[in-house]
Amino acid sequence: MKDLLWLMRKMSVSMLRKKAGLLFLVLPIAGVLLSMLIYGSSNGMDLRVGIVNRDGDEAVTRDAVAFVEGLDRVKVVMTDEETLKKDISEGKLDSGIVFGQGFAASVREGKPERLDILSVKGAQVTAYVRAMLNSFVGNAASIGSATDGDAAAFDRIYAAYREGGFRMKTETLEDTSNRKDVTTQSMGYLIAFMMFSAVNMSELILKEKENRTFLRLLSSPVRARTYVLANVTLNFIILTVQIVVTLIFMKTILGIDSGIPYGSMIASLLLFALASIGLSLLIVAFAKSSPMANALQNLIITPTCLLAGCYFPAAFMPDSVRKVANFIPQHWLLDTIDKLQNGSSFGSLYLNLGILLAFTAAFTLIAVYRFGRNNDTRMFV
């Protein structure tokens, strides 16, 4: 135990002498700030909708336009069809609605014509307006179906429908989408920095072999296993500090609530920390020098973090690429965080946690086997 503590203190001093040692504690905080800049400033701007009315001064069409104008967070601009298409293509408008000639007549008959809703941004922009407007048009068309072409009856019932009083109780719900995006991206950056930090710490083994310090240590009562255990233990402590500092900074300084209990979040990240340490030992086991270890970590960590969605959302990638991410430990941690944010309990994610443990065991066993088979006298174990 005394040898273990002495080795950990010695490695801590060596780590603190390196500028990169302190930098790895600061970089996760920088990642959180970057995530805030990317997602935190989005507060839900008004939806800009252009409307073209080719149906004249029909009451039903006027009411439909007025209904859209009354929607929350929607700004309506009356325009013509040519200008509408131009403004949408130039980004001046988010979407456009075209009420064709005969629209009101079709509603009176109970068979409303399909509305043309234009957008270059897809369903994420048009879905809200389309759903609300279809509801209004559907109610008016129901009156048309019930009156069966009787214009006087339609006007009478429709007028009562317009003027009818409705009791409505509203509740304001907090939009947590930005909070989720910030948390996921912050954890992505933290994952990448944890992996680089783990390799940076394990690389001390190679550096001390290169400068012959390791051989001098083995000539003392210190055993090789104790040396490796000290490195792994200190590595785990450093990663734990990274995790705790990042979560505290997110909660207390920036006020970001991940929506996940701290216990579940820390437990998931600590489990991934073990997988990171296992991967770092694997890299050191195959590297014959510290420059080679640096090359291997860049070759392995950076591409896998990209595939897993650590630097940008994985939803932007094609399905074929996302399937490859299933073989990467970073993916399973991000998937665990996503499911915890969506209400899953920590205990129900045994598959994700088991896969992370399997990655840890696989990396560690391969590293131990590699160390044991290495015939280079500069290697150990």
Image (cartoon, rainbow, N blue to C red):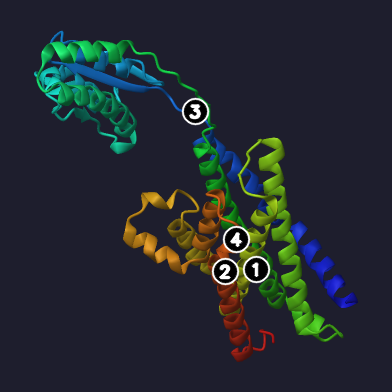
- Residue drawn at x 70%, y 69% is 204
Residue 255 falls in which quadrant of the image?
A: top right
Pair 4/1: label in front: 1
Neighbourhood count class around disc 3 (C-alpha, 10 Å): few under 14, some 14–19, many 20 upward? few
Q: Secondary structure at mark 1?
A: helix
Residue at 68 percent of width and 40 percent of height = 251
Looking at the figure, which quarter contains the N terminus? bottom right
Residue 224, visible in the rendered structure: yes
Mark 1–mark 2 distance (CA, rounded to whole Å): 9 Å
Q: Are marks 1 and 2 in contact (CB under 8 Å)?
A: yes
Vertical relation: 221 (above or below) 240: below
In the picture provided, is 164 more to the left or to the right than 248?
left
Mark 2: amino acid? Leu
Q: Name the spot of residue 229 as percent of width and height, x first.
A: 75, 76
Mark 1 surroundings within 10 Å by alpha-carbon count, few (fewer than 14), some (14 through 19), many (20 or more) = many
Residue identifier under label 1 = 274
Measure the alpha-carbon separation of dots 2 and 3: 35 Å
Reading the image, the residue beneath label 3 is 43
Q: Nearer the viewer, residue 223 or 311?
A: 311
Q: Separation of disc 4 and disc 2 at Cα?
A: 18 Å
**Could you tell me the amino acid type at mark 3?**
Asn
**Mark 1 touches mark 3? (CB < 8 Å):** no
* Label 3 SS: loop
